[in-house]
Image (tube, rainbow, N blue to C red):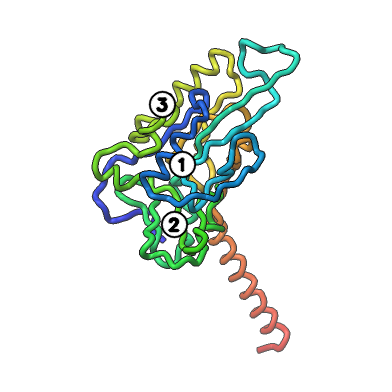
Amino acid sequence: MSQTSTAPARPTTGFFTDPTLCIGCKACEVACKEWNQIPDDGFEWTGLSYDHTRSLGASTWRHVLFVEQDRPAGPQVTGSEEPFRWVFLSDVCKHCTHAGCLEACPTGAIIRNEFGAVYVQPDVCNGCGYCVVACPFGVIGRREGDGRAFKCTLCYDRQLGALTPACAKACPTEAIRFGPLEELRPYAETRVAGLQARGFTDAQLYTAEHTSVGGVHALALVLGEPEAYGLPPAPEVPTAYLKSSWTAAGLAGLAMILAVVLAFGV
Protein backbone atom coordinates (compact mmCIF):
# COMPACT_ATOMS: atom_id res chain seq x y z
CA MET A 1 0.00 0.00 0.00
CA SER A 2 1.42 3.41 -0.94
CA GLN A 3 2.26 5.79 1.90
CA THR A 4 1.32 8.81 -0.20
CA SER A 5 -1.86 10.21 -1.70
CA THR A 6 -2.67 12.16 -4.84
CA ALA A 7 -3.89 15.16 -2.82
CA PRO A 8 -2.19 18.54 -3.38
CA ALA A 9 1.05 18.89 -1.43
CA ARG A 10 0.86 20.98 1.75
CA PRO A 11 3.25 21.36 4.68
CA THR A 12 3.35 18.19 6.77
CA THR A 13 1.79 19.03 10.10
CA GLY A 14 1.92 17.37 13.49
CA PHE A 15 2.02 17.78 17.25
CA PHE A 16 4.65 18.39 19.89
CA THR A 17 3.55 17.44 23.39
CA ASP A 18 5.44 18.71 26.44
CA PRO A 19 4.60 16.97 29.75
CA THR A 20 6.54 19.58 31.73
CA LEU A 21 3.78 22.04 30.84
CA CYS A 22 0.83 19.65 31.15
CA ILE A 23 -1.34 20.06 34.28
CA GLY A 24 -3.44 16.94 33.67
CA CYS A 25 -6.68 18.87 33.21
CA LYS A 26 -7.81 16.60 30.33
CA ALA A 27 -9.24 19.56 28.41
CA CYS A 28 -7.68 18.02 25.29
CA GLU A 29 -9.61 14.78 25.82
CA VAL A 30 -12.89 16.62 26.25
CA ALA A 31 -12.31 18.93 23.27
CA CYS A 32 -11.41 15.96 21.05
CA LYS A 33 -14.57 14.08 21.99
CA GLU A 34 -16.83 17.10 21.61
CA TRP A 35 -15.52 18.24 18.24
CA ASN A 36 -15.34 14.77 16.70
CA GLN A 37 -18.55 13.55 18.36
CA ILE A 38 -16.82 10.49 19.78
CA PRO A 39 -18.93 8.26 22.04
CA ASP A 40 -18.02 7.79 25.69
CA ASP A 41 -15.82 4.93 26.87
CA GLY A 42 -18.12 3.90 29.68
CA PHE A 43 -18.15 5.41 33.14
CA GLU A 44 -15.89 3.23 35.24
CA TRP A 45 -13.81 3.98 38.31
CA THR A 46 -10.51 2.27 37.47
CA GLY A 47 -8.57 3.14 40.61
CA LEU A 48 -5.60 4.00 38.39
CA SER A 49 -4.81 7.39 39.86
CA TYR A 50 -7.14 9.88 38.13
CA ASP A 51 -6.92 8.07 34.80
CA HIS A 52 -10.26 6.56 33.88
CA THR A 53 -9.92 6.50 30.09
CA ARG A 54 -6.89 4.20 30.52
CA SER A 55 -5.57 4.09 26.94
CA LEU A 56 -5.98 5.25 23.37
CA GLY A 57 -8.53 3.43 21.26
CA ALA A 58 -11.46 3.71 18.88
CA SER A 59 -13.32 6.04 21.25
CA THR A 60 -10.33 7.74 22.90
CA TRP A 61 -8.22 9.69 20.43
CA ARG A 62 -6.48 11.78 23.09
CA HIS A 63 -5.44 10.25 26.39
CA VAL A 64 -3.73 12.02 29.29
CA LEU A 65 -1.34 9.64 31.00
CA PHE A 66 -0.72 9.99 34.74
CA VAL A 67 2.80 8.66 35.30
CA GLU A 68 4.26 8.21 38.78
CA GLN A 69 8.06 7.91 38.88
CA ASP A 70 10.33 7.14 41.82
CA ARG A 71 12.75 9.97 41.24
CA PRO A 72 13.01 13.64 42.25
CA ALA A 73 10.47 16.03 40.76
CA GLY A 74 13.30 18.25 39.54
CA PRO A 75 16.82 19.47 40.22
CA GLN A 76 15.57 21.75 42.99
CA VAL A 77 14.69 18.77 45.19
CA THR A 78 17.53 16.44 44.28
CA GLY A 79 18.69 14.53 47.33
CA SER A 80 15.33 14.50 49.06
CA GLU A 81 14.62 11.44 51.20
CA GLU A 82 11.49 10.50 49.30
CA PRO A 83 12.03 11.31 45.62
CA PHE A 84 8.76 11.32 43.69
CA ARG A 85 7.66 12.72 40.36
CA TRP A 86 4.18 12.86 38.90
CA VAL A 87 4.18 13.48 35.15
CA PHE A 88 1.24 14.07 32.80
CA LEU A 89 1.55 13.36 29.09
CA SER A 90 -1.24 13.79 26.54
CA ASP A 91 -0.82 10.85 24.20
CA VAL A 92 -2.18 10.61 20.65
CA CYS A 93 -1.81 8.69 17.37
CA LYS A 94 1.75 9.12 16.06
CA HIS A 95 0.80 9.44 12.35
CA CYS A 96 3.94 7.42 11.56
CA THR A 97 6.11 8.18 8.54
CA HIS A 98 5.87 4.47 7.65
CA ALA A 99 2.48 3.57 9.07
CA GLY A 100 1.83 -0.09 9.83
CA CYS A 101 -1.94 0.43 9.83
CA LEU A 102 -1.87 1.97 6.36
CA GLU A 103 0.28 -0.82 4.94
CA ALA A 104 -1.91 -3.54 6.47
CA CYS A 105 -5.26 -2.14 5.31
CA PRO A 106 -6.63 -4.34 2.48
CA THR A 107 -9.43 -2.00 1.38
CA GLY A 108 -7.65 1.31 0.98
CA ALA A 109 -9.67 2.74 3.86
CA ILE A 110 -6.50 4.19 5.40
CA ILE A 111 -4.74 6.87 3.40
CA ARG A 112 -2.18 9.62 3.92
CA ASN A 113 -3.87 12.96 3.34
CA GLU A 114 -2.42 16.20 2.01
CA PHE A 115 -1.26 17.25 5.48
CA GLY A 116 0.83 14.09 5.90
CA ALA A 117 -1.57 12.60 8.46
CA VAL A 118 -2.67 8.96 8.44
CA TYR A 119 -6.43 9.14 7.95
CA VAL A 120 -9.06 6.39 8.28
CA GLN A 121 -12.01 6.69 5.90
CA PRO A 122 -14.89 5.21 7.92
CA ASP A 123 -17.11 4.76 4.86
CA VAL A 124 -14.51 2.45 3.29
CA CYS A 125 -13.45 0.50 6.40
CA ASN A 126 -14.83 -3.06 6.53
CA GLY A 127 -13.81 -3.73 10.14
CA CYS A 128 -11.30 -6.48 9.35
CA GLY A 129 -8.99 -5.35 12.16
CA TYR A 130 -5.71 -5.86 10.29
CA CYS A 131 -4.72 -2.29 11.13
CA VAL A 132 -5.22 -2.90 14.84
CA VAL A 133 -2.56 -5.60 15.07
CA ALA A 134 -0.23 -3.73 12.70
CA CYS A 135 0.04 -0.60 14.87
CA PRO A 136 3.24 -0.76 16.99
CA PHE A 137 1.79 1.79 19.42
CA GLY A 138 -1.57 0.14 20.07
CA VAL A 139 -3.37 3.31 19.01
CA ILE A 140 -6.06 2.24 16.56
CA GLY A 141 -9.00 0.07 17.56
CA ARG A 142 -12.42 -1.15 16.46
CA ARG A 143 -15.41 0.55 18.07
CA GLU A 144 -17.72 -1.68 20.06
CA GLY A 145 -21.16 -1.95 18.51
CA ASP A 146 -19.83 -0.59 15.22
CA GLY A 147 -16.92 -2.82 14.26
CA ARG A 148 -15.05 -0.24 12.20
CA ALA A 149 -11.61 1.13 13.07
CA PHE A 150 -11.18 4.67 14.37
CA LYS A 151 -8.33 6.87 15.60
CA CYS A 152 -7.13 10.48 15.64
CA THR A 153 -7.69 12.28 12.33
CA LEU A 154 -5.45 15.20 13.33
CA CYS A 155 -8.71 17.14 12.99
CA TYR A 156 -8.62 16.91 9.21
CA ASP A 157 -11.84 18.90 8.87
CA ARG A 158 -10.47 21.73 11.02
CA GLN A 159 -7.20 21.81 9.08
CA LEU A 160 -9.14 22.16 5.83
CA GLY A 161 -10.68 25.27 7.38
CA ALA A 162 -7.27 26.58 8.50
CA LEU A 163 -8.12 25.84 12.15
CA THR A 164 -5.97 24.32 14.88
CA PRO A 165 -6.92 20.79 16.02
CA ALA A 166 -9.38 20.85 18.90
CA CYS A 167 -6.99 19.34 21.47
CA ALA A 168 -4.24 21.90 20.87
CA LYS A 169 -6.76 24.75 20.77
CA ALA A 170 -8.21 23.75 24.14
CA CYS A 171 -4.90 23.22 25.96
CA PRO A 172 -4.61 26.05 28.54
CA THR A 173 -0.84 25.74 29.02
CA GLU A 174 0.23 25.12 25.41
CA ALA A 175 1.53 21.70 26.41
CA ILE A 176 0.23 20.59 22.99
CA ARG A 177 1.65 22.50 20.06
CA PHE A 178 0.45 22.08 16.51
CA GLY A 179 2.08 23.22 13.28
CA PRO A 180 4.39 22.27 10.41
CA LEU A 181 6.86 19.59 11.49
CA GLU A 182 9.75 21.60 10.10
CA GLU A 183 8.95 24.26 12.70
CA LEU A 184 7.97 21.97 15.56
CA ARG A 185 11.15 19.91 15.51
CA PRO A 186 13.65 22.75 16.16
CA TYR A 187 11.36 24.13 18.84
CA ALA A 188 11.16 20.71 20.51
CA GLU A 189 14.93 20.22 20.37
CA THR A 190 15.48 23.65 21.91
CA ARG A 191 12.98 22.83 24.64
CA VAL A 192 14.79 19.57 25.49
CA ALA A 193 18.19 21.29 25.52
CA GLY A 194 16.82 23.98 27.84
CA LEU A 195 15.45 21.45 30.31
CA GLN A 196 18.69 19.48 30.31
CA ALA A 197 20.63 22.68 31.03
CA ARG A 198 18.34 23.30 34.01
CA GLY A 199 19.14 19.91 35.50
CA PHE A 200 16.50 17.66 33.94
CA THR A 201 19.17 15.35 32.57
CA ASP A 202 16.69 12.61 31.63
CA ALA A 203 14.69 14.85 29.28
CA GLN A 204 14.66 13.54 25.71
CA LEU A 205 12.69 13.88 22.49
CA TYR A 206 10.78 10.81 21.35
CA THR A 207 10.80 10.58 17.55
CA ALA A 208 11.26 6.86 16.66
CA GLU A 209 13.35 8.00 13.69
CA HIS A 210 15.89 5.18 13.55
CA THR A 211 13.34 2.38 13.36
CA SER A 212 11.16 0.87 10.63
CA VAL A 213 8.51 3.43 11.64
CA GLY A 214 10.78 6.08 10.13
CA GLY A 215 9.79 8.78 12.60
CA VAL A 216 6.52 10.12 13.95
CA HIS A 217 4.45 13.24 13.30
CA ALA A 218 3.45 13.49 16.96
CA LEU A 219 6.68 14.39 18.72
CA ALA A 220 6.80 14.04 22.48
CA LEU A 221 9.16 15.21 25.17
CA VAL A 222 9.62 12.53 27.82
CA LEU A 223 11.28 12.60 31.22
CA GLY A 224 12.93 9.26 31.87
CA GLU A 225 12.41 6.10 29.86
CA PRO A 226 9.85 6.02 27.01
CA GLU A 227 8.50 2.73 28.37
CA ALA A 228 7.10 4.57 31.40
CA TYR A 229 4.69 6.31 29.00
CA GLY A 230 3.78 3.20 27.06
CA LEU A 231 6.08 4.21 24.21
CA PRO A 232 8.20 1.37 22.80
CA PRO A 233 11.89 2.38 22.67
CA ALA A 234 12.25 0.76 19.25
CA PRO A 235 8.82 0.43 17.58
CA GLU A 236 8.70 -1.78 14.52
CA VAL A 237 6.21 -1.97 11.67
CA PRO A 238 5.30 -5.68 11.16
CA THR A 239 5.53 -5.39 7.37
CA ALA A 240 9.21 -4.44 7.73
CA TYR A 241 9.94 -8.18 7.91
CA LEU A 242 7.72 -9.10 4.98
CA LYS A 243 10.48 -9.03 2.36
CA SER A 244 12.84 -11.20 4.39
CA SER A 245 10.01 -13.63 5.20
CA TRP A 246 9.06 -14.09 1.55
CA THR A 247 12.73 -14.42 0.61
CA ALA A 248 13.22 -17.13 3.22
CA ALA A 249 10.07 -18.94 2.07
CA GLY A 250 11.21 -18.79 -1.55
CA LEU A 251 14.66 -20.16 -0.72
CA ALA A 252 13.09 -22.95 1.33
CA GLY A 253 10.84 -23.85 -1.61
CA LEU A 254 13.79 -23.97 -4.01
CA ALA A 255 15.72 -26.14 -1.56
CA MET A 256 12.82 -28.61 -1.40
CA ILE A 257 12.58 -28.79 -5.19
CA LEU A 258 16.33 -29.36 -5.44
CA ALA A 259 16.15 -32.10 -2.80
CA VAL A 260 13.37 -33.87 -4.76
CA VAL A 261 15.35 -33.62 -7.99
CA LEU A 262 18.45 -35.09 -6.36
CA ALA A 263 16.48 -37.81 -4.57
CA PHE A 264 14.64 -39.11 -7.61
CA GLY A 265 17.19 -38.20 -10.21
CA VAL A 266 14.65 -36.30 -12.29
**In this view of the protein, which residue sits in the foreground, 225 or 158?**
158
Residue 70, position in %: x, y?
A: 70, 25
Q: Disc 2 and disc 3: Cα gap in Å?
A: 33 Å
From what the image shows, is residue 77 above or below residue 258?
Answer: above
| Mark closer to the observer (2, 3) | 3
Residue 264, position in %: x, y?
A: 71, 88
**In this view of the protein, which residue sits in the foreground, 72 or 108?**
72
Residue shown at 45%/28% (left/top)? 175
160 lies left or right of 210: left
- Number of numbered labels in the structure image: 3
Mark 1: which amino acid? Val
Q: Which of the marked residues, 2 or 1, is nearer the chain's N terminus?
A: 2
Residue shown at 56%/43% (left/top)? 53
Residue shown at 47%/63% (left/top)? 146
**Crowd rating for badge 2 (residues with CA inside 10 Å; few <14, some 14–19, many 20+):** many
Residue 230, position in %: x, y?
A: 60, 40
Q: Which of the marked residues, 1 or 3, is nearer the chain's N terminus?
A: 3
Q: Which mark is residue 172?
A: 3
| Mark closer to the observer (1, 3) | 3
User: Residue 232's image quarter?
Assistant: top right
From what the image shows, is residue 88 above or below residue 35?
Answer: above
**Crowd rating for badge 3 (residues with CA inside 10 Å; few <14, some 14–19, many 20+):** some
The residue where tag 1 is placed is 216
